[in-house]
Structure formats: C-alpha cells, structure tokens
Amino acid sequence: MQEGTRLTRSIGLIPSSVMIGIFFMVPFVLILLTSVSVPTADGDYQLGFSLEHFDRFASWFYIERALFSAGLCALIALLSLLIAFPFTYMLTQFGPRSQTVWLIYILAQLSLSEVLIAFSWQILLSRTGGIANILVWLGLAEKSFSMAPSAGAVLAALVYLAVPFSVLLLYPALSRLDRSLTEAARTLGASPLRTFFTVVVPVTRPAIISGGVTIFVLTLGAIIVPQVLGKPEHWTLSVLITDQAIFNFNMPFASALAVVLLVISASVIYGVTKFFGGKS
Amino acid sequence: MSGLIIEGVTKKFGNVTAVEDVNLHFKTGEMICFLGPSGCGKTTLLRMIAGLEEPTQGSISFEGKDLTRVPVHQRDIGMVFQSFALFPHLSVGENITYAMRIRGHSRSEREDRAKELLDMMHLPGVADRRISQLSGGQRQRVAIARALALNPQIFLLDEPMSALDANLREAMQIELRKLQQELGITTVVVTHDQTEAMTMADEIVVMGRARVLQTGSPMEIYKKPVDKFVAGFIGTSNLLPAKMSGENAVRVGSAELRVEHGAVGQPAGTDVLLMTRPEEVFVRPIGASAPANAVTGKVSFVRDIGATIEILVDCDGHEVISVLTPKDWPDVRIGDAVTVEMPAGACTVLAA
C-alpha cells in the first residue's frame, strides 16, 4: 500500500518538475554553457570551456556596474518598504469593504508596465510639460527645468513601480496579525507608536524581509527605466546584458553578465534570509 | 467614592446595542465575575473598563478618578486575553517585563521582577524560553504574570480558562482566586461558565441581551434568582408552571404549596413559575404520611453517577430533578409513583 502512494505522489510531481525543467533549468543551463563558450575563427562561438568572458567582467567598469545595480536595488527595496509598510498596516485597519476597494486599485497599478511608467515619468519630469512648471507657478523656481535624466529620476520611478508590489507582498502577513497582540501591548502601557515599533514590526519581520528581498530581485531586472530616465552612468547590469545580447550580438558575454546577476540575487536571498530571518 | 463605579454605561455599534444602561458599584479588592451567554455584552463591558472601547454614554471611574476618556495605555490596568496574546517574538521573561521595558526600567530590575513573578506563578526558570515551547497552562500563567508585573490597580481577565483543557480549568480557578485574595487586587473576570463564577467570585453580575439581570454573591444568585433566565443559567433548576392562589401560596396541578421567596405578592390566578433547586427537593414513595409541600409524579429515570444520584420525576408532564447522596437513597425505581417534597423555604416564585 505504501509503495502505491509513494508512486502516485511521485507521479504527481511530474507536471511541476517538467515545468521547472523546461522554463528554468533548460535556459539556465544554456546560459551557463554560453557564458563559458569558446570563440571560433570566424567570429562565432562553440561549446567549450573558456573563462575569458568572466575575465572581461572582472574589469572595474563592470564590477562597478554590478555594485551600483545591487546598491540601487537595495535602496529601492528599502524605500518601497518604508512607504508601503505603514500604508499597508493602516489599510488592514479599514473596514473589509474599503480594504477590497484599495486592494483592487493597487492591483490595477500593477498592470502598468515598466515601459508605461518610464515614459509617463519622462513626461512628468520634463522641462516643457513636467512638475517643474508647477514649481515655477508656485514661485519656487525661476524657470522650468528638466528633472531627468538623473539618478533621482531612476530611483523615483522604480520605487513608484515597487510600492504597489510591496503592499501586496506585505498585506497577507499584516492582515493576519492578531489584533489582540496590539491591544495587549496597549494595556501594558505602550502608546500606539510604541506598539507599532515594538510589536507590529517585529512580529511581521519575516514578511518584511522576504518582501524586501523579492523587490530587490525584481528591480534588478528593470531595463527600460534606467535607459529612459537615466544617463549611461545610471544604467544597471540588466541594461548592459540587453545591450550585449541584442545590440552587440555578444551572447557569451551577455550570458556571463547574466550569471553574475544570478549569483548576486542568489547570495542576497541566501545571506539576508539567513541573517535576518525571512520566511523561506 | 472608592471602588470601581460604572454609571449609566451604554455601548452602541452602529444600530446594534451591545451594552445597555449598566450601573454597577464594586468595592476595591473584590473579585467580580461578569457571567452570561455569548453576545450578552459582558466582554464589551470589560473592554470599556480596559479602555479598548469607549462608552457611547455613561462613565467609568475607579477610586474617584474618572477613567472614561483616559486612553488605554494610560490606565493602570493589567489584562489577560482569551488567547493570552503573548508576544511570539519575545522570550517568556521579555513578555512578562514588557510593560517595564516600555517605562524604561533597567535590565537588572526587569530580570529580578521576571524571576519573582515566575516563582509566584510556579514556573521557575523558564524566563529564557520561547512562547512556542510552553504548554497551554504555562502560557496562561505567563499571561497572568505579564499583566501583574507592575502591580496594576485593576486586573481584567477575558474568559481566561477557555483555552485550557477541562481538567486544568478547575485547578486554575482555585489558584487564580487564591492569588487574587493574596494580592488584594480589584479583579473582573468575564466567563460563560457558571461553576467558574461560583468558584471564584465575591460578586457575580449576570448579564443577558446587553443588560444586567442580577448582581449578588454566588449564593444569593443561586438561591434567589430574579427570573427564569438567571435561574436556568446558574445551576440546574426545576421550573414548574403554577398559579398564584393567595398570599404566599401557589397551586401546582392539584397541589397547594406554601411559598416564601420571589414574586410572592402577585394577585391570585397569575401564572407563575415555581423554582426549586434539585438538592432541596426530596423524593419519597407514596405512603402513609404525605408531606405538606409536595407534588406527585412518576419516576422517569434514575442517574447514579457515583458520588450523587439524580432522580428524574415526571410531574404531570413536567420534569423535576432531585439530587441526593447515596446514603439518602429513598429506594424508588423507574415507574414508581412518588411524592416530591418541596419545603416552603426552598421554593422561589418567578415570573412566567
């Protein structure tokens, strides 16, 4: 009888294994193989083992790009959590009907693609039609100016993209937060603010950590916003990968950069989760 | 103006009235139980004393100070929640001294006090454990210790035993009562379990449908319930339909009984209920001497549960239960015609 159930369980795993196999393992292996491929005489590449593409990465230019990308995305994760967490907590205090309305509105925000956000913000930050004109109208500036391309513009637009996502990532844990915990804290003399910092935040820490890590990994893949709203010095590693792959036809180098990106993501996920205790 | 005074308190949630016009006065140091079925408003009333809800009308004051508009975190209370609400991210010791940490007490002060409280609650040495490592009974003790850490003036408990196993409950009821008496702290417990209320309370407040139905000591309420709802809620009661037949007398079927307690002054002919407690009525075989205050019937069931025996008698379609100890066994069997003696002092007349 046990043999039977074990077999049926293994069979049950086949569909998901096939999916993971096709959609993750195969591309991953292909990228890995391409990143170590050997150049041939006529400019093409073949299967082999050469570390020259990783060697090319090892220059300061690319390493600096990798560090910049990681730093930018960490900052985006931090800022979007700082904005989304108090907002999501307040949201869970609303009545159920208001909550549903707000969640639908936030979900709708997610349907806006990176492309749409990038170009909308470009207009918003432009000299001719952007918010600088409001500052002039208010008397805070003499004449209108363009706020993009700049690092701030890239940061702002990506945080704007990340916040609705953060709300949805934090919502389950915050809505499940036992209300009697905050009530107990208040009966023990904690003001609403103290209760927030000594009870609400620590208890939902796993969700905050895994939410932050998720935002980090997702923003690492942004390619439109850095190019549209940023100068070349603001371009992330993902932009360079696209550049190498699509415009330079240098698949092996692009693959090498992609492997670096994967390693960064994996180490951040592992490191942060291990040291700060996220949900696995 | 000492003690806990609740004056004219009403609480409405939109169109729903959770608590209606409650007026209560308790002495400092008393243990009070709010007793009633779910939805009767007892928890809402407790939460208003805590400050977790604000009364729509009325005021609450303690020792002369009006608490009604004082925010929760500024009231000198300690509260134990039904689910205990222990902080999962803090150790046992950190949970207990949370209130001290908020007020800036030093680490050594907190550690000492945690040890003191854990010893008092018979849980020595668990200060460094995680909450998830404790059993239900241990968690309750930690919750109590946490509430009492700073010696609050009012101790509030919301159905504190409901999360415990049945066999633990009785022991904890007694322990909690002893602790309360030792500390002399004004305590309010909300419960739906009348044995719990009878065991622990100096005074019981019976509530039903948002109103206070009766207040009094456990024995007062048990012996002289004010209406059939309270009679039915506390202990088992025999309720026989009867008609008033003059001053201090009722007619049950063909029997005339003298009564002393309850709504005895009603005009003759009024429909009433005659209430007696099972341990105060006596079943005897129909024989030579017919006792004065008695009704007749047939034994329908005998429940021998070891320490006590219950005899169920069918009196003209209504059930009367008599409870007695084995040594008083009147030797009757199912089907026997019997007479059930109901002494005048044991009868209470209630509105029908």
Image (cartoon, rainbow, N blue to C red):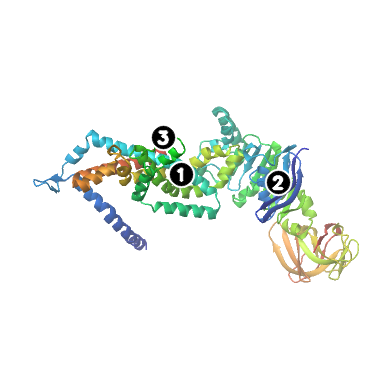
Q: Quadrant of the N terminus of chain A?
A: bottom left
Give the CA distance from mark 1 to mark 3. 34 Å
**Chain hosting mark 2:** B
Query: Which amino acid type is shown beneath numbered disc 2?
Result: Met
Mark seen at residue A84: 1
Query: Which amino acid type is shown beneath numbered disc 1?
Result: Ala
Left or right: B120 in relation to A82: right
**Chain hosting mark 1:** A
Q: Quick one: label 1, few (<14), some, or many (20+) residues within 10 Å?
A: many
Left or right: B54 in relation to A204: right
Give the CA distance from mark 2 to mark 1. 48 Å
Left or right: B5 in relation to A191: right
Mark 2 lies on residue: B200
- Quadrant location of residue B269? bottom right
- Quadrant location of residue B336? bottom right
Q: Nearer the viewer, residue B33 or B332?
A: B33
Q: Tell me residue A18's x, y (percent).
A: 29, 58
Mark 3 lies on residue: A142
Q: Tell me residue A171's x, y (percent).
A: 47, 49
Nearer the observer: mark 2 or 1; the answer is: 1
Q: Tell me residue A158's x, y (percent).
A: 37, 44
Residue name at image x 54 percent, y 38 percent: B92
